[in-house]
Structure formats: structure tokens, C-alpha cells
Image (cartoon, grey):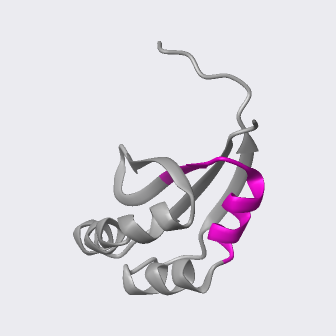
Amino acid sequence: MTIATMFVRHTVSDFGKWKSVYDGLEPWRKKMGTTAASVHRDASDPNSITVLHQFKNLDAAMAFAHSEELKSAMAKGGVSRHPEIWFTEDVEHTPH
């Protein structure tokens, strides 16, 4: 089984507002097939966010990325620039 990871990098107008919207979508993210997620802030710009979502396969990741729900959530959360989205097929995970 190949795990797929979707990375999203975007700028938000207010991190607190964005995080509230993001947290409220946890049930939907699980329903869409996310198996793991993490949120990262740029050390020099707290409104520059990178989000990682893992899926069982690339098809699930692509469906999530192209969903109207995600586009709507980004607008509601105050994403202020077009997001940069890319996908990987995971090759290796190590505990260190």
C-alpha cells in the first residue's frame, strides 16, 4: 500500500481564525480519508502556514484537494493568497 501525502502552503490573514476553521473540519477530514495531519508555521511569518495531510492513496488525496468543501474552508479561514499544493508518494518513515 502506498501512502500519499498532500502538502499545502498558504498565507492566512489571521492564524487564530484560520486554526479555528481548520479544527472544526476534523470530522470532515477523517471522512475524506485523512490518516494523519500536521500544521506548521513559518518561523519568520506566523501567518505563513504549511499543512500536511496523509491518505491511504493518491486518489483520496486528490479528491480531498479538489473538493468544494476545502475551497470553501480556505475562504472562510482567511487564506489570503492562492495556495501552493503538491503531492508525494511516501517512500520511507523512520522513528527518528
Q: Nearer the viewer, residue 42 or 72?
A: 72
Image-quadrant location for residue 23? bottom left
Q: In the image, is 28 to the left or to the right of 16?
A: right
Tell me the magenta residue range: 51-66
Residue at 36% of width from left, 47% of height from top?
A: 44
Residue at 39% of width from left, 81% of height from top?
A: 78
Q: Which of 31 and 19 is in front in this view?
A: 31
Residue 57 drawn in magenta: yes
Residue 37 is situated, as x and y percent measured from the top left of the image, at 45, 48
Residue 35 is situated, as x and y percent measured from the top left of the image, at 51, 47
- Judged from this view, the residue extending furthest toward the top is 96
Query: Compared with residue 28, is residue 39 higher up or lower down, i.e. above or below?
Result: above
Q: How many labels does the image show?
A: 0
Residue 1 is situated, as x and y percent measured from the top left of the image, at 75, 36
Query: Compared with residue 48, is residue 28 higher up or lower down, i.e. above or below?
Result: below
Residue 47 is situated, as x and y percent measured from the top left of the image, at 36, 62
Q: In the image, is 70 to the left or to the right of 42?
A: right
Residue at 53% of width from left, 55% of height from top?
A: 34
Residue at 48% of width from left, 54% of height from top?
A: 51
